[in-house]
């Protein structure tokens, strides 16, 4: 019996996921535990394992498609079984998915290659994920085109030997012909492309976007220049999301940064005590400088509740508990997981919690709900490990503030009676939303963080 594979729902706040790669194609044999596809939410990545054994009968989406959670993605069963009833859009979508499966035995993959039908009286909808028309230098053999592509090319009067195929092994498939037919070319442009070695731009300068000979020459010249000077890489889905979030933060809040140094002698001494306690087995966590700083920030937030808040435009959400966000650098980009009810944790419990969420982020197994911008009430971002002294962190809206922590450097300090000495100072940079906080209150909070750091008393 055919079994449907749905897009999992990772956390209550996640409404859709982006498929990064389908590992199994139509016609592939599947065993229980095989990876079907990889996908990602806002910042976490996952792999979907097969719960069924059989053959992939249909795949309703392409790589990089954004798919709603709980939507049908694939169908696994025995060859010849019906899968139309599982199609997200009904029978028409199933026909589109099936039409792309021209010859499973030849390796053709299942893709949504059939363009959606536009409502009557409206402009035709563009084809989904249709590649740009590309000419293969020297041409390709007509046997490199699938039967369906050949039939469509004959109807459109298109020479498949002049099209670069996007199917397995460069095979020309139906969507390649659709793309070629959708790109109008002038007589000169057609002649130039027939000679090979040129690629048509998505739209030309002629009437109705017609590609002219001058467009081909310009595109060719730009391609030659670009190849010598730089390369163009598309942003990852995660990078796009981070970019959008940062831009939105700066565009929709009044951000200002204050900077202050904190005497780090006390936390350096506590770090040595914690290390010795770990070696002697009196504690079971490797408490770091960053853990002490976060512990001090939590204490300061409890004394300045308005900083521990969300700015909602004309109102504020002031938290009674500290939900601490901590920026984590991963191979896929910056993630900001949240430690819920951090004020209830001891220093060792906080240390273990921070390490756990950081590890989960790097493994891609973090709960997406903990990455929501509304999950945390305040965020700490530490760049001290990179040698950065001061910086201007960007607020993770709707939070009212974020603390940047820098490296420890020696600075002169008045020790009294006219005696000056160099002592270790920790750089603190508070970015706050001026809509929510006045400068005086923000400064007092930052000074309180420094005071807590300089006067921490913890027994190990």
Image (tube, grey):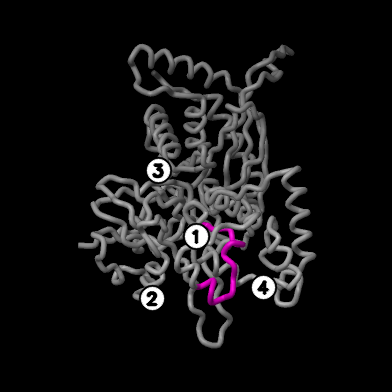
Kindly identify the residue that appears in the image at 57 percent across and 61 percent down.
131
Q: Which residue is mark 2?
A: 92
Q: Nearer the viewer, residue 224 or 144?
A: 144
Q: Mark 1 or mark 3, which is nearer the start of the sequence?
A: 1
Camera-nearest label, 3 or 2 = 2
Magenta segment: 152-166
Q: CA distance from mark 1 to mark 2?
A: 30 Å
- Is 358 situated left or right of 154 in this image? left
Q: Which residue is mark 3?
A: 366
Q: CA distance from mark 3 to mark 1?
A: 48 Å
Mark 2 lies on a secondary structure that is helix
Mark 4 lies on a secondary structure that is loop
Q: Which residue is mark 1?
A: 143
- Residue 252 location, quadrant: bottom right
Q: Which percent across, then down, holds residue 283?
A: 35, 20
- Is 344 situated left or right of 310 in this image? left
Q: CA distance from mark 4 to mark 3?
A: 48 Å
Q: CA distance from mark 3 to mark 2?
A: 37 Å
Q: Mark 2 and mark 1 in contact (Cβ < 8 Å)?
A: no
Q: State whether residue 396 is above or below residue 268.
A: below
Local packing at callout 3 (Cα closer than 10 Å; few below 14, some 14-19, many 20+) is many
Q: Mark 1 and mark 3 in contact (Cβ < 8 Å)?
A: no
Q: CA distance from mark 4 to mark 1?
A: 25 Å
Q: Which residue is mark 4?
A: 184
Camera-nearest label, 4 or 1 = 1
Q: State whether residue 181 is above or below residue 332.
A: below
Kindly identify the residue that appears in the image at 57 percent across and 75 percent down.
156
Camera-nearest label, 2 or 4 = 4
Q: Nearer the viewer, residue 307 or 148?
A: 148
Local packing at callout 1 (Cα closer than 10 Å; few below 14, some 14-19, many 20+) is few
Kindly identify the residue that appears in the image at 28 percent across and 50 percent down.
30
């Amino acid at each position: 019996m055919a079994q449907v594979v749905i897009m999992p729902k990772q956390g209550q706040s996640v409404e859709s996921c982006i498929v990064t790669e389908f590992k199994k194609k139509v016609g592939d044999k599947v065993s229980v535990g095989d990876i079907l596809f990889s996908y990602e939410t806002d910042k976490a990545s996952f792999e979907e394992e097969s719960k069924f054994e059989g053959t992939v009968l249909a795949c309703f989406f392409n790589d990089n498609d954004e798919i709603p959670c709980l939507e049908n993605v694939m169908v696994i069963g025995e060859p010849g079984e019906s899968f139309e009833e599982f199609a997200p859009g009904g029978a028409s979508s199933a026909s589109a998915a099936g039409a792309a499966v021209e010859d499973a035995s030849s390796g053709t993959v299942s893709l949504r290659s059939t363009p959606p039908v536009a409502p009557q009286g409206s402009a035709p909808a563009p084809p989904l994920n249709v590649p740009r028309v590309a000419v293969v230098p020297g041409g390709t053999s007509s046997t490199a085109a699938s039967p369906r592509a050949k039939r469509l090319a004959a109807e459109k009067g298109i020479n498949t030997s002049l099209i670069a195929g996007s199917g397995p092994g460069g095979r020309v498939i139906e969507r390649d012909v659709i793309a070629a037919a959708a790109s109008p070319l002038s007589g000169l442009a057609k002649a130039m492309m027939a000679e090979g070695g040129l690629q048509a731009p998505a739209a030309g300068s002629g009437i109705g976007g017609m590609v002219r000979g001058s467009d081909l020459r310009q595109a060719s010249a730009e391609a030659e220049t670009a190849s010598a000077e730089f390369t163009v890489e598309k942003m990852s889905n995660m990078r796009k999301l981070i970019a959008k979030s940062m831009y939105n933060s700066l565009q929709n809040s009044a951000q200002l940064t204050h900077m202050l140094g904190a005497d780090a002698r006390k936390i350096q001494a506590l770090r040595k005590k914690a290390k010795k306690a770990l070696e002697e087995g009196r504690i079971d966590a490797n408490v770091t400088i960053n853990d002490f700083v976060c512990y001090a920030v939590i204490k300061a937030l409890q004394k300045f509740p308005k900083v521990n808040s969300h700015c909602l435009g004309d109102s504020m959400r002031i938290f009674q508990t500290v939900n601490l966000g901590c920026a984590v650098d991963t191979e896929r980009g910056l993630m900001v997981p949240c430690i819920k009810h951090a004020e209830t944790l001891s220093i060792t419990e906080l240390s273990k919690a921070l390490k756990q969420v950081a590890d989960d982020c790097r493994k891609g197994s973090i709960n997406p709900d903990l990455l929501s911008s509304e999950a945390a009430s305040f965020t700490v971002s530490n760049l001290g490990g990179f040698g950065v002294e001061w910086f201007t962190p960007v607020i993770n809206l709707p939070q009212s503030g974020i603390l940047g922590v820098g490296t420890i450097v020696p600075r002169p300090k008045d020790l009294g009676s006219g005696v000056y000495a160099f002592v270790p100072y920790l750089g603190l940079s508070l970015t706050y939303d001026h809509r929510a906080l006045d400068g005086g209150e923000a400064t007092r909070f930052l000074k309180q963080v420094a005071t807590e750091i300089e006067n921490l008393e913890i027994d190990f």
